[in-house]
């Protein structure tokens, strides 16, 4: 007679084990004597369930701190957290109304430069193509007008000389990136507050090695724009500089293993770097503000290690959602067989 | 301390056992003033978040060690990831058994074993191991999430909340509600054949015996 686990618990972890009785076989008709062995299994329950309630009352009820709940609450997204707080009757948090506003730089690149396709590729075939490319890189009308604005604030501003100083700024910033902790202050002088996190994100706990070999083409200023913030006289200028250089980049992880790039392979890099300055400020410096990566640029090399591609949920377009809604309104009429057909 | 607590509580509970708030004061109800932190996810850098101890003083700092890039000829260094969970509602002595079981296993084997072991503490350990595995792949450049083994796994005593249990007449017993801290360190690579030093083979025992016998000297002898 094999008892299942479920039966065991019901009978308070006691198992009635049928023992072998040789006498039964010999004496027919005699009363059957079974050897009963009670095997007990370990359990935190008392063997007599009759007085469970009284036994429970002996213990003082205590509200134990639930750290697991706090841990899960901490990681909830904002709307779910708000729902939980409403259920419990807790007041919503006081919103932090004082937001720090940074006036030393703008928040984005205004009217970004659209690099002409096929730039940076040398083709021996057509001279016409080369001419077109050169003209595309020359500064057009609006850029020249904006340049005049800059010349009002900065006397003797030479756009061609600026391209070279811009490249120097970029090279210095890249060298300083190799040790962000030490060079934080200097980096802030060369990089705007908007671009700083973009440049330094993910560099903690990693070693970066970067080297500048030479420039393939001299740097060129390609695009100039100005914007104002808060008032019309508070002007910021952004200049896009095109740089074609040869560089070495190697990124090592925490344990010294190569993650990306190579220290021996020199790469040709074509960059369109945006520099910004608060020209209304007499002490405004030209700093790196961002980079323009055109769509036609060949993609970067993947990481050295293999990894799983992240799977994202498709975000339906607004038009698709509207189209989904429309057919639902029409279907009730056409759901059944039409009278006309019948 | 127990006696003074008992006296006050005994007076209150002379007739019937009354629900008494936690003996150790915790400001869990007053969290709403700190809830602004919920919107700031950068609080991962803080040790305490909403009254929950999250970062340790030293164990997590092992994750911030940066080794210099490997030179040619150097053997690659295996990745090491430390993780911790504080104030798990389970006795540290009981959790220790599970922590010991998991030592020296590969991460997959450990998760498998812990999923089917009949103990409550296993739930917490499994969560911590899965979290650590995710961290390893996401933050510490570990290529294969199965290529990890558990190098260190131990528990520490956490908070202890003391309650009371009534015995006959005015006798009370102190009940301890125990919390534990669970620490784990994952290392990249295959698990070692022996985590603890293996027992000596007969041959090794014999060699040891002979060595010890031959090392005997007569002190201050000629």
Image (cartoon, coloured by chain):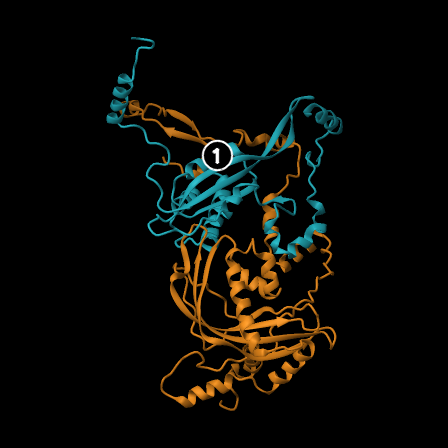
Chain colours: A orange, B cyan
Crowding at label 1, few (<14), some or many (≥20) Cα neighbours within 10 Å? some
Q: Nearer the viewer, residue A176 or B108?
A: A176
Report the residue that reaches farthest toward the front.
A156
Relative to A181, say whether A270 is above or below: below
Q: How many marks?
A: 1
Residue at 51 percent across and 32 percent down: it is B93
Residue B221: x and y in percent read 31, 8
| Corner quadrant of residue B196 | top left
Q: Is residue A219 visible to us here?
A: yes
Q: Residue at x 46, y 51 (%)?
A: A254
The residue to which callout 1 is attached is B96
Chain where mark 1 sits? B
Q: Position of residue A285 (x, y in %)?
A: 64, 68
Query: In the rendering, at what x and y percent does residue A107 appear?
Result: 63, 69
Report whether A102 appears left or right of B89.
right
| Secondary element at tag 1 | helix
Residue B133 higher or lower than A275, as above or below: above
Q: Residue at x 35, y 45 (%)?
A: B190
Position of the N terminus of chain A by quadrant: top left
| Front residue (pair A48, A94) | A94
> Is residue A322 visible to the viewer in this orientation of the structure?
no
- Please state the horizontal and vertical placement of residue B141, each as a whole percent of the image: 44, 54
In the foreground, A252 or A33: A252
């Amino acid at each position: 007679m094999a008892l299942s686990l479920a039966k065991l618990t019901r009978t308070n972890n006691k198992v009635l084990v049928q023992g072998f009785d040789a006498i039964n076989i010999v004496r027919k008709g005699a009363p059957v004597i079974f050897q009963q062995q009670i095997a007990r299994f370990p359990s935190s329950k008392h063997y007599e369930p009759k007085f469970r309630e009284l036994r429970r009352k002996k213990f003082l009820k205590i509200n134990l701190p639930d750290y697991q709940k706090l841990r899960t609450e901490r990681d909830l997204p904002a709307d779910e957290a708000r729902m939980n707080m409403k259920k419990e009757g807790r007041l919503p948090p006081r919103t932090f109304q004082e937001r720090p506003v940074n006036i030393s730089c703008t928040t984005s690149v205004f009217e970004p430069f659209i690099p002409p396709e096929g730039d940076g590729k040398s083709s021996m075939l057509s001279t016409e193509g080369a001419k077109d490319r050169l003209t595309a890189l020359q500064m057009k009308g609006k850029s020249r007008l904006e340049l005049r604005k800059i010349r009002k604030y900065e006397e003797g501003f030479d756009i061609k000389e600026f391209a070279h100083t811009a490249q120097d700024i970029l090279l210095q910033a890249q060298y300083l990136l190799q040790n962000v902790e030490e060079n934080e202050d200097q980096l802030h002088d060369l990089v705007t507050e908007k671009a700083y996190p973009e440049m330094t994100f993910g560099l903690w706990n990693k070693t970066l090695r970067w080297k500048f070999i030479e420039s393939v083409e001299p740097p060129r200023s390609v695009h100039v724009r100005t914007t104002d913030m808060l008032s019309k006289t508070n002007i910021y200028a952004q200049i896009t500089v095109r740089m074609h250089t040869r560089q070495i980049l190697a990124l090592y992880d925490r344990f010294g293993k190569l993650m990306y790039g190579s220290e021996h392979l020199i790469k040709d890099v074509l960059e369109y770097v945006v520099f910004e300055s608060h020209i209304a400020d007499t002490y405004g410096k030209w700093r790196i503000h961002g980079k323009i990566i055109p769509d036609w640029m060949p993609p970067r090399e993947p990481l050295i290690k293999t990894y799983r591609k992240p799977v994202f949920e498709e975000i339906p377009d607004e038009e698709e959602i509207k189209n989904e809604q429309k057919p639902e309104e029409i279907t009730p009429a056409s759901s059944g067989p039409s009278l006309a057909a019948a | 301390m127990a006696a003074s607590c008992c006296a006050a509580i005994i007076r209150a509970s002379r007739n019937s056992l009354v629900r008494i708030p936690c003996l150790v004061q915790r400001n869990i109800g007053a969290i709403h003033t700190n809830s602004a932190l919920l919107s700031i996810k950068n609080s991962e850098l803080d040790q305490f978040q909403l009254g929950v101890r999250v970062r340790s003083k030293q164990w997590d700092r092992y994750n911030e060690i940066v080794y210099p890039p490997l030179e040619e000829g150097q053997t690659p260094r295996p990745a090491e990831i430390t993780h911790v969970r504080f104030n798990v509602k389970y006795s540290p002595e009981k959790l220790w058994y599970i922590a010991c079981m998991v030592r020296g296993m590969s991460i997959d084997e450990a998760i498998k074993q812990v999923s089917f072991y009949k103990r409550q503490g296993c739930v917490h350990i499994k969560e911590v191991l899965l979290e650590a595995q995710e961290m390893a792949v996401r933050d510490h450049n570990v290529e294969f999430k199965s290529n990890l083994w558990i190098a260190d796994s131990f528990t520490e005593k956490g908070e202890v909340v003391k309650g009371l249990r009534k015995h006959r007449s005015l006798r009370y017993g102190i009940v301890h509600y125990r919390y534990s801290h669970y620490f784990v360190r994952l290392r990249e690579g295959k698990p070692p054949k022996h985590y603890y030093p293996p027992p000596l083979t007969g041959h090794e025992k014999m060699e040891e015996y002979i060595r010890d016998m031959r090392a005997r000297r007569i002190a201050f002898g000629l």
